[in-house]
Amino acid sequence: MSSEAKTSGRPTLKTIAKLSGLAVPTVSRALNNAPDIGEATKARVREIARDIGYQPNRAGLRLRTGKTNVIALILSTQHEVINHTARLITSIAAATRNTPYHMIVTPYFPDQDPMDPVRYVVETRSADGLILNQTRPEDPRVAYLMRIGFPFATHGQTSWSDRHPFYDFDNATFGKLCVQNLVARGRKRILMLAPPQTEFYAIEMIRAARAEAAKSNVQFELIEDVTSYQSAPAILNAIIARYQSGFSPDGIISASADAAMRITAGLEGSGYVIGKDVDLISKEASRILKSFRKEILVVPEDVTKAGDFLCRAVMHAVDHPDMPPMQHLEQPEG
């Protein structure tokens, strides 16, 4: 630390003002990314704040402004969801850099009411805005937040998506593309392992895949008793059972990379060769499937872009509540 930045006691806005030669209100506005403060001034103030170890007093900030400058990501502890959102967490955290905002992760367990963490954040005012995923068509969390006017953004759509911020992967187009790719390879009996049908993206994915299969005059079957969120043994047993039932799929659609690897284990354990006996196509965010088995067909999803957009969308909702919500629907390629 430079001698200029050495201080005694807890650094405050007054400390930064003294070291920078700026007024305290100017320092405060610079740290809060005010549009009327020049970028050079903001960079200088942030550098001094870092050098002296300044951290805002969030209790005091809330008393003065009613804000915490915190964004809460409400995250399920489900294994499949954790894997998928590891990149989401990183990208949201990165998007808060050089802004007054910080991210906290508020988890909830599969046997817990998903409303619990939402109500906790709202009632304790521990964050200015929320990011939600695993959305349902008429999601009670979204209905509650819209009703009380609390800022949020969703990773996924709802029946009210025209009225709130969201980022989503176009899962209807994904389902359609998967069937088209399999049909182009001469596949006639298509099996899909989807997420839980309570979730918006699963409904869209299944609907579009089923419609495209009917249009292409090929058989389509959905695994109804197991989802892509479930354990490896459950998925393995479900895949083997379909072959034993006489359906014998020659094309399989997976909703995630984890599920695709479990499907692969089930197929290969039963003597089937991917790319020869059966084609497997999957969505993935982690870019690992081609290294795992180069024969797997992949449709990439950019979760990093999703996290960055969602962070900016919820900050926009906090800072500009009267402006239209930020929304984006990512188009799949493949």
Image: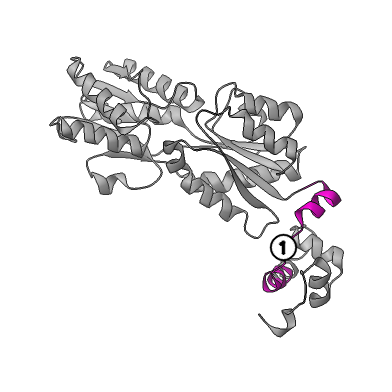
x 63%, y 35%: residue: 117
Position of the N terminus by quadrant: bottom right
Whether residue 107 sits left or right of residue 314 in the image: it is left
Compared with 65, 273 (above or below) is above
Relative image position of residue 76 (x, y in whole percent):
52, 36
Q: Residues within 10 Å of mark 1 (few under 14, many from 20)?
A: few
x 84%, y 49%: residue: 63
Whether residue 324 sits left or right of residue 18 in the image: it is left
Position of the C terminus by quadrant: top left
Compared with 280, 189 (above or below) is above
- Majority SS type along the magenta span: helix
Magenta residues?
Answer: 44-67
Does residue 136 show up magenta in the picture? no
Relative image position of residue 30 (x, y in whole percent):
77, 63
Whether residue 43 sits left or right of residue 244 in the image: it is right
Give the camera-side residue of 71 and 45. Answer: 71
Which residue bears the numbered disc 1?
55
Residue 229 visible (yes or no): yes
Residue 325 visible (yes or no): no
Does residue 64 show up magenta in the picture? yes
Residue 325: quadrant of the picture: top right
Whether residue 75 sits left or right of residue 332 in the image: it is right
SS for callout 1: loop
Colouring mode (rainbow / by chain / secondary structure / one colour): one colour
Give the camera-side residue of 39 and 273. Answer: 273
Residue 94: quadrant of the picture: bottom right
Relative image position of residue 5 (x, y in whole percent):
73, 79
Amino acid at the residue labelled 1: Gln
Give the farthest residue toward the bottom. 3
Give the farthest residue toward the left. 271
Give the camera-side residue of 318 and 228. Answer: 228
